[in-house]
Structures are given as structure tokens and as C-alpha cells.
Image: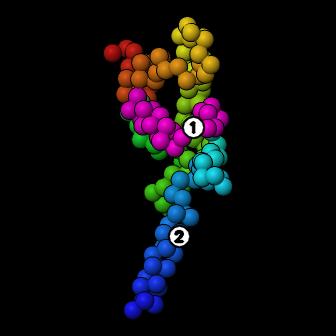
Amino acid sequence: MKIKNLLAILSCLGILITLFSFNSSSIITDTKAGDPVWKNLKVLPQDISNDSLKGLMRGYNDALGVKCGYCHTQIEGTDKLDFAADTKKEKEFARHMITMTQKINAENFNWENHPKPESIDVVTCAMCHRGNTSATKSLKK
């Protein structure tokens, strides 16, 4: 009986280890300390938490009325996305727009000389896009 319990526990541990070793997102890897190391962040802070990054991405989804696949490439033959790949032009446009809003906020709304002006969030994607991929279309409404 004890051997069966031990085998069951070891089997469960093996399954858990296997599941956690296959990260469904290709954008992060874990360091020894367990902190995420992002593979291809170019305009967002390298020390951003997984939850903060997901929150930002959900905000972009809502602001533009799109899903993740709008900027991120689908891995061929799967329903998964390669978040680190730079194969879609929309991702580079998004980086440009993120940089633009960070600059606008830092230069125009940093009244108290905040030490991280890029984190000021006054001008957002939603202000112009209003649920559309084209800000021009939403501003004409």
C-alpha cells in the first residue's frame, strides 16, 4: 500500500514537472530566482511583471478592438501564438505607438518630475482608437 501511494505521488509530481516545463508562452523563461526574463521586449520595461504585461495587452486589445493574433504570429499548425516573434508589421506599429504615447505623457504630463515618466498613463491608445485599429476612422466619428 505504501509503495502504491509513493508511486502515485511520484507520478503526479512527474506530470506536474512536465506541465510546468512546457511553457505555453514563448515570450518568457524563468531565471534561477523565478523572475520572468522576457525574450523580446523592446519598448516595455524588462522588469514588468507577468500580470502587468497581461493587463497592458488586454488594454491594447480593448483599445483597438482586436485579439492577440492581430500583432502576434500564430505558430503554424497550432492555435498558439509566438509572442516573441517580430514577423507581423502590426507589432512594430504597436511599438511605435507605445513609444509615442510614452513620449507624449513624459513631455506633457510629468509636472512633478516623476522618476519614471514612461509609466505616466494620461494619453492612452483608447483616446484615439476607441475600439478601432485605425485611429483616423475613430476620430472621424
The residue at the point 55 percent across, 47 percent down is: 83
User: In the image, is 57 to the left or to the right of 32?
Assistant: left
Estimate how packed mark 2 is, as few (under 14), some (14 to 19) or many (20 or more) residues with alpha carbons within 10 Å: few
Instruction: Identify the element where label 2 is drawn.
Output: helix
Question: Looking at the rendering, in which quadrant would you find the C terminus?
Answer: top left
Contact, mark 2 vs mark 1 (Cβ under 8 Å)? no
In which quadrant is the N terminus drawn? bottom left
Residue to which mark 2 is pinned: 18
Q: Give the distance between the C-alpha atoms of the residues marked 2 and 1, in whole angstroms.
A: 26 Å
Q: Quadrant of residue 49?
A: top right
- Asked if residue 58 is among those painted magenta in the image, a careful observer would answer yes
**Who's the residue at 52% across and 63% down the image?**
20
Residue 14 spot, x, y in % from top left:
51, 75
Q: Position of residue 93 (x, y in %)?
A: 57, 30
- Can I make out residue 104 in this image? no
Residue 92's place in the image compared with 19, above or below, is: above
Q: Earlier in the sequence, mark 2 or mark 1?
A: 2
- Decide: few, some or many residues near mark 1? Use Cα within 10 Å; few <14, some 14-19, many ≥20: some
Residue type, numbered disc 1: Ile
Q: Is residue 101 above or below residue 44?
A: above
- The secondary structure that dominates the magenta segment is helix
Report how many numbered discs are placed on residues in the image. Answer: 2
Q: Position of residue 134 (x, y in %)?
A: 44, 25
Magenta region: 42-63
Name the residue rendered at 60%, 48% in the picture: 35
**30 left or right, relative to 126:** right
Q: Amino acid at mark 2?
A: Thr
Which residue is tagged 1?
48
Q: Is residue 50 magenta?
A: yes
